[in-house]
Each structure stands twice: as C-alpha cells, then as structure tokens.
C-alpha cells in the first residue's frame, strides 16, 4: 500500500471511531507531516482520499474538518397503483446499458456492479489460481447438476445467518442470480400468467418476465416499508396471480429493508391466496446494519418461498455463482436448471467454497458494507448539493445504489445527449418498470471507490438537469 | 510419462503406421525388453495398454499380434415414422443418469463425457491457472453479454474451418451448448409449437423442448444418411412446424455424418417451407476424417440456420463454454441469453481463447480423434464378441458413443437391477426419444481410456442380455 493510503487508513479509523467531533478541525497538514514523517504532498493526498470517502471536508484557507450531518433530503414518492397486469417493454434500453458497459472509458454509474478491486477479495483470487492448478482435472469435469457439494455445504451455513434452514441437498447452484430468478419464474409460470412485482424493481427481472411471456402486475412500493400490502391484496383478490416477486432486503433500486411486521403480512397474504413468493436476496449480506436482517424465507412455513441469490454483488459478478433455495418447487426448478444451461462451471464454485470455508467472507463483507455506506452518504451529499432543490433521494439500508426522483414533468432521457458526450452512464428509471414508469427517476451506483471524476459526473448531471428545468419552466 | 507409456507410444505409432501387417505377430516381450533396455514387466504393461487401445491382441501361449479386421456388424434399423407431434416425457430417467454420475465409483458408459485426462489438455489447465492469477480482476467483472471478444475472435476462425462465415460480432458465447440450444428453441417457439427433430436425438434437447412446452415431431433417421427428408417433407406439409433440429456431424446418438446432397436437400426443404434450422455441431470437430466436414450452416443462404456448439466434447464440459451463431435471429437470441443466465463466466473463456490462440487445439483434436476412433473399433469388437448374435451396432463417423440395437422385444430396462448391482451406467435408448421409443436400444460411451474393467462391464452387459433372451424365448 502506498504511504498516503496508510496514512488515510489511520486517520480514517480515528474519525470513524469518533476521536474527532463532527464539525471539528482535523490536524493540520504540517502537523501530520511531522508526526508521521511523511511529505506534505503525502498528507494532502491522504486528506483528498478521506474527502472522497466522506470522512473529511476541506474549507478554503482554513484546513480540513470532520463533516457535519446535513438535513436529510425528501424521500422518493410511492408510485401510483396499476389497474391491471401488463406486458413488459423496453428491452432496447436495457441492452443500451449493457452495450455502454463494454466501452470501458465511461464513468459507470448505471450498472449495479460491486467494487471488485477491494484487497479483501485477494484470497478469492488466490483460491481461483490455486484451484485451477490443483483441482484442474476435477474442475474440467461436468459436475453435480445441483452444484459442487463443498459449496452447497457453505451455502447451507450462510442460510443460518439469513434465518432459514436449507440442507445442502435442498439447494441448487445457478449461473448467477439471473438464472435462479429465470428458473423460478419458468418453474411457476406459463406464458400469459401474471406475476405481482414490487415496483420499481430490478430491470433484469422485468426482462425475464417478458421473455417468459409473463405479465407483470406492478405493485407500488414505499421507499421505506416496501411493497404495498394493500395494493397487493387488491391485485390478489381480482386477478389470478401466479407468483409474487420481492426484494425484501436492501431492495433494488429503492434500497429499503422491509420491516418485520410487513414481512409477516406479506407471508400471510401469500398463504391466504396460496401463491408462491420469489424472493431476491442478492443484497441481503450487504445490508449496512449488523447482524444482517433475516431473509423473508425465514418466515416461510410451507416451502412457498423460492429464495434466489448470488455472489455477484457481495464478491464478484464474473464468478457467475448464484443459488436458489426453491422450497417445495425443488424438482421443477432442477429441471429448469438442467435445460437452461446444464450444470454451473465448477471452478468458480470450488474457489468460492474455499474462500468461505477459510473464513474470509465476513471480513470482506464488513469492509464492503462500510465502503458502500460511507459512499452512500457522500453521494447523497453531492446530489443534495448539485441537483436542483426538491430532488428526492432514497436512503438505502444496504447495497450500493441511490434512487433519485426529479419533478414529475422531467424526463431523464432528455439528458442522453449530454451523458453520451461526457461518457457518463446512468440507469434510467423507466427500465425498472414493466410499464416504463419512472421516467423522472434515475439510479446511480456508488460502489467503486470515488475519484474526483465521480463527483464531477454527479455535478455535471445535476447542473444539466437544473438548466433544463429552468429552460422549460 | 512412465516408461511403459513411452514404449506403448513408440510401438503404437509403428502399428498405426502399418509397419506390422494385420494378423502378424508382434515382437516378443523378451526382444523388446532387450531392445529398449526395460524390464519384462514394463513391456507387458505396454502391451496390455496397446490391447486396451485396440492396437494389439494377445493369443494365449503364443504372444502378441496385430488385430485383424472382423466382419462389420449390422447397422441399427431406421425408426418408424410418427403420425403426429407429441409431448416429451421421461425426465425421471434423464435425472437418474445425472444422479448416478455423482457417485463416482461407477463404470460410466452412459454420459457423453469426453476424456479430460489427456495430456494435450495440459496447456489449457496452465492457461486457466495463469489467467486466474493475471486476468484476476478482469475475470471477476461482468463481461460483454456476447462473450469475451478474444474468444469470439477465435470462434470466428473456427467457423472458417467449418465452412461458414461469422464475424466475432455475429457470435454469442453461451454457458455450454445446452444454453445455446435452449436460447434457440425459446427464441423461435412458444408453448404449443412444434419442432421437427431427427430421431433418435440428444436427450438434453428433448428436455429443453419439454420445459419450453414445445411438442416434438420425431423424424426417423437413417444410421448412415441421417434424417429422412421424405418423412420431414410430409411433416412440414401437414403441420405448422416452427423449427427443424438436427445434428448433421457425428450425430448423437447414431454417429452418422450426413452426406452433402442430403444436406442440400434439407436446406432446400427449410427454405421452401420457410422454417429455421437449429444445428447442433458439438461433435463437428471430432469427426474422425480430416479435414472436418462443413457445418450445415455452410450451405445457409439466408441466415436461417442457428448453429449451436461448445467445447464440452472437444475440450472439457466443466468449462461451460459454448456458442451460438444465430444468423438472422441474433437479437432475439441475445435477449434470451441475457434473461437465461446473464453473461457467461469470463475466466474459462479467456483461458480457452488463449489455448486456441497459441495453436494447441489442432494437436489436441488429432489426438482425441485417434483415441476415440481406435476405441470405437475396440468397443465394437467387444460388443460383437460378447453380445448375442444379431445385435446391431452403429458405425459412428466421429465422437465417442456407440448405439446398440437389440431384438425389438427386448427392454434394456430389464438390465437395471444387474447394472445397479455391478455399478455400471449405460444410457437407455428411450431417453433419446420424446415418445420413449428405442427401449430395445442403448448408447455406450467409448471416450475414456479403456481399462480391463471397461471390457469386463461390456461383457457383463452382453452376457446378461444373452441370458435374458434365452430365458424368455
């Protein structure tokens, strides 16, 4: 590690531990230079790094200060209920988001991609390298259609932390959470069927429904309490809903973690109408609070919850290691898995199992949760500062994306020429809705360690919105 | 390499090059021991290895001989045409086959699994190990939904050998051939649609059709010329067939490679009825003759052939690296790929690209083709020797599976208790048919290097069949 990062680490820990009060002045550059025997430039670099991390604030001609809390911005509003299920549209824009990803030179605030450059992932890389040497031949064989047993063993332990029980034999490893969700939907639904989804919701899920010919019944969601049970109940009463799809923990894109009594209400509704629930728990381990909240599946009494997850957000998406705990739908889901892509590649499974077995996972999660939470605060601050007054911002309880709501008349696609020109990628709100709602919203990722370019991009977006609003009103 | 393998390699090459005539006596153990300065035991081990490879034959109290050709057995008969499309059945038995795979202590003659212990795969393992160290971070990122560009570059070159043109941008990397086939079917068909399939055909394809709610119209196939164009034409005339599915090269399970004029006839039929063709070319590079036959796609004039393939048979199934050249259906297939499992894991793709780029692939293929062809002959010989007279055997032109047909009244499932007891796994004929036909057939794999246990297993099966036939007639 370079010197300034060493120093930033030391200072950062002191600030986090509350050794300096909020708003108070931090040691001067000169004093730190003497204390730690490093150059003035090194201290300045360390402070700039702390600023990016939200742990220090520069005041011109005065020095560095511990940031003070700002008044919290308004939360996004809850969407209006739909009257009926609808076909999913808008593949084109999802594809655009994926295409832009490729180019590499962009400032990527659009994809829900974790920071894979964290040093706490090094043991995973080492495991991958070691296993591709040693387990070589084994890893080239097909494997168990359910997944490598050593990994399922570990997944069964993680299930305990998430409050549910699943023996290794009750779990199926999938090629990412996407395959888990896709197998769940296809196991439960035929074309023309209806799935009730919390709205806004993960765009990949919208596309799964579309390709399965399934209609989405979008249920409005509160930015703090999650899916509206009242609207859901109405939908279940009037329509032959085949499944309910929710993300109860650090929901994507709103970031809420459903309160316990709402979860119980959700389970009771599902039982009353005898409908299965597809739970996406992919952000569950990234909820900032410790211990992590239980999965909805913890309340499942009769195997009706199909829990889908993966290591794509907690470790790295390129591993393509996900899993599903399909409850009473095990057989059907296993068949779907077999016809979808056969068994999942064994090598990354073996490496992840090793990483978990050796106990590297909790430390890695601690680090990432801290980083994501800190950067949530920094990015919230940037948006408050640079976006027009009245901008509403979600207050995520985990994960690494912010949901931003602009005045109802604003269309974020009006930003497209500016974004293209500046090489900035955001996720437009409308891809999180089957009906293309939320055109006045956007999702910004705060996963990767911030650089000055990150703040520049957020400011640039905010200013462009301000100009457009002024021009049109 | 151990001494006896060195010696076996030297002797084997001499035999293959025709230095000794068929039926002639090979040098004595003593003479070889003196000539090569190795022990008598080493020479005996080498000879036993050559025997397993079908290059030498022991005659009691006389020594070792070059095997003579036997009269070829009768070929399997062509199935009877179906009158209508049907729903696919029999998932249970496919699952049994997959479950048995797990146990490891079995003699596995059932799965279509290549020999992954070949030394010619070592550069691939080295590439995997190297890339997981170096490309570490890159390989943990999501990647291009279409697949790693360096791999698609190489796939585009392989396409040239297979006689068709596909720019890297016209290819989509998939998680094995299974995902390629599954995406093709779902891109072309809705539930209730009909697909015409050459019969018997790959059981995984049958299950894909089943899970997609698609009906299979089984078209009888000649064990030498492939799918009956006459029966296919009838089906196309009378039914709204949405796609034709064929394996023109080293077809699984019959092993035929369709003659050129039949291919042309097939393409003309597809054009006349305006139906797309799903071509499974997974065994194309394992056709014994050199150069490899063209893919059917080489004759495609208007992008109606969706070529599906993978490295699961040529390199190793555990890589889970396949691809599809979807012609004019590109957009739809890419969407299916996205919703099916997201992008394919980058690490194995990078390693395979490296293996190909460095030119290891042709040498590996040469070696595997030799091994599989040699073992085809040996296993054919065993079946002729140990199975009841009148047993019909396919004469595969590539790949590593034999199709064996017994008298029509015989049900191979009658062997199940004996197979279980002896830990032998075979693939029952009926899983290769949507309708559960071919109960009097079985498929035996001859991929892995034979051991005395392999011959023992084949003999044991043959004897059991003989006993049963005698008891019942």
Image (cartoon, coloured by chain):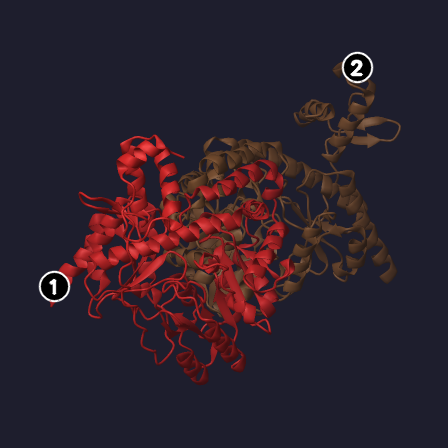
Chain colours: A brown, B red
Q: What is the x, y in percent for residue A95?
A: 65, 59
Q: Is B350 placed above or below B233 here?
A: above
Q: What is the x, y in percent for residue A201?
A: 59, 56
Q: What is the x, y in percent for residue B330?
A: 60, 65
Name the quarter where the C terminus of chain B is drawn.
Answer: bottom left
- Lateral position of residue A294 relative to residue A471, left or right: left
Name the quarter where the N terminus of chain B is drawn.
Answer: top left
Q: Which mark is residue A34?
A: 2
How busy is the neighbourhood of tag 1: few (under 14 within 10 Å), some, or many (20 plus)?
few
Q: Secondary structure at mark 2?
A: helix
> What's the residue at 66%, 42% (across, down)?
A447
Q: Is B67 placed above or below A237 here?
A: above
- Residue at image mark 1: B470
- Chain under callout 2: A
How busy is the neighbourhood of tag 2: few (under 14 within 10 Å), some, or many (20 plus)?
few
> What's the residue at 81%, 54% (across, down)?
A421
* B384 or B37: nearer the viewer: B37
Task: Residue B113: tell me if it is visible.
Answer: no
Q: Which picture quadrant has residue B64?
A: top left
> What's the residue at 40%, 46% (across, down)?
B13
**Mark 1 or 2: the one toward you:** 1
Task: Residue B304: tell me if it is visible.
Answer: yes
View extreme (bottom): residue: B238
* B96 or A246: nearer the viewer: B96
* Callouts 1 and 2 close, C-beta under 8 Å: no
- Lateral position of residue B167 relative to residue B124, left or right: right
- Chain under callout 1: B
Badge 1 and badge 2 both on one subunit: no
Q: Secondary structure at mark 1?
A: helix
* A31 or B220: nearer the viewer: B220
Q: What is the x, y in percent for residue A330?
A: 38, 54
Report, in whole angstroms, how far the alpha carbon at label 1 lies from the one at label 2.
Answer: 98 Å
């Amino acid at each position: 590690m370079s010197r300034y990062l060493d120093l930033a680490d030391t200072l950062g820990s002191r600030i986090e531990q509350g050794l300096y009060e909020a708003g108070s002045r931090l040691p001067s550059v000169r004093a730190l230079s003497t204390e730690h025997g490093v150059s003035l430039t090194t201290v300045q670099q360390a402070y700039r790094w702390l600023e990016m991390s939200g742990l220090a604030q520069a005041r011109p001609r005065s020095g560095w200060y511990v940031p003070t809390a700002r008044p919290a911005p308004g939360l996004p509003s809850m969407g209006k209920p739909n009257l009926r299920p609808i076909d999913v549209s808008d593949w084109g824009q999802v594809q655009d988001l994926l295409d832009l990803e490729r180019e590499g030179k962009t400032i990527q605030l659009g994809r829900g991609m974790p920071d894979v450059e964290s040093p706490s992932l090094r043991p995973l890389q080492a495991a991958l390298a070691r296993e591709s040497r040693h387990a070589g031949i084994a890893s080239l064989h097909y494997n168990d259609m359910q997944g490598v047993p050593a990994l399922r063993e570990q997944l069964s332990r993680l299930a305990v932390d998430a409050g549910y029980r699943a023996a290794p034999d009750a779990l199926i490893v999938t090629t990412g959470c996407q395959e888990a969700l896709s197998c769940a939907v296809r196991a439960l639904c035929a074309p023309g069927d209806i799935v009730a989804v919390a709205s806004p919701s993960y765009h990949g899920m919208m596309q799964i429904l579309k390709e399965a010919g399934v209609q989405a019944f979008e249920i409005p969601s509160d930015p703090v309490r999650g899916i509206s049970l009242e609207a859901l109940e109405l939908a279940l009463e009037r329509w032959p809903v085949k499944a309910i799809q929710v993300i109860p923990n650090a929901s994507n894109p709103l970031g809420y973690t459903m309160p316990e009594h709402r979860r119980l209400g959700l389970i009771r509704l599902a039982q009353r109408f005898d409908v299965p629930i597809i739970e996406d728990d992919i952000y569950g381990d990234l909820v900032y609070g410790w211990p992590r909240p239980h999965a909805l599946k913890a309340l499942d009494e009769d195997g009706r919850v199909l829990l889908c997850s993966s290591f794509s957000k907690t470790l790295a998406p390129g591993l393509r290691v996900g899993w599903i705990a399909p409850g009473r739908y095990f057989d059907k889901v296993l068949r779907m898995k077999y016809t979808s892509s056969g068994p999942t590649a064994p090598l990354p499974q073996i490496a992840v199992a090793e990483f978990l077995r050796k106990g590297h996972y909790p430390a890695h999660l601690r680090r990432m949760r801290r980083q994501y939470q800190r950067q949530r605060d920094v990015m919230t601050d940037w948006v408050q500062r640079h976006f027009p007054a009245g901008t509403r911002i979600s207050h995520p309880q985990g994960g690494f994306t912010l949901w931003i709501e602009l005045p109802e008349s604003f269309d974020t696609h009006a930003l497209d020429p500016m974004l293209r020109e500046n090489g900035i990628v955001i996720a437009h709100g409308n891809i999180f809705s089957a009906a293309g709602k939320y055109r006045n919203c956007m999702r910004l990722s705060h996963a990767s360690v911030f650089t000055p370019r990150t703040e520049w991009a957020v400011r640039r977006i905010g200013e462009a919105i301000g100009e457009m609003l002024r021009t049109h009103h």
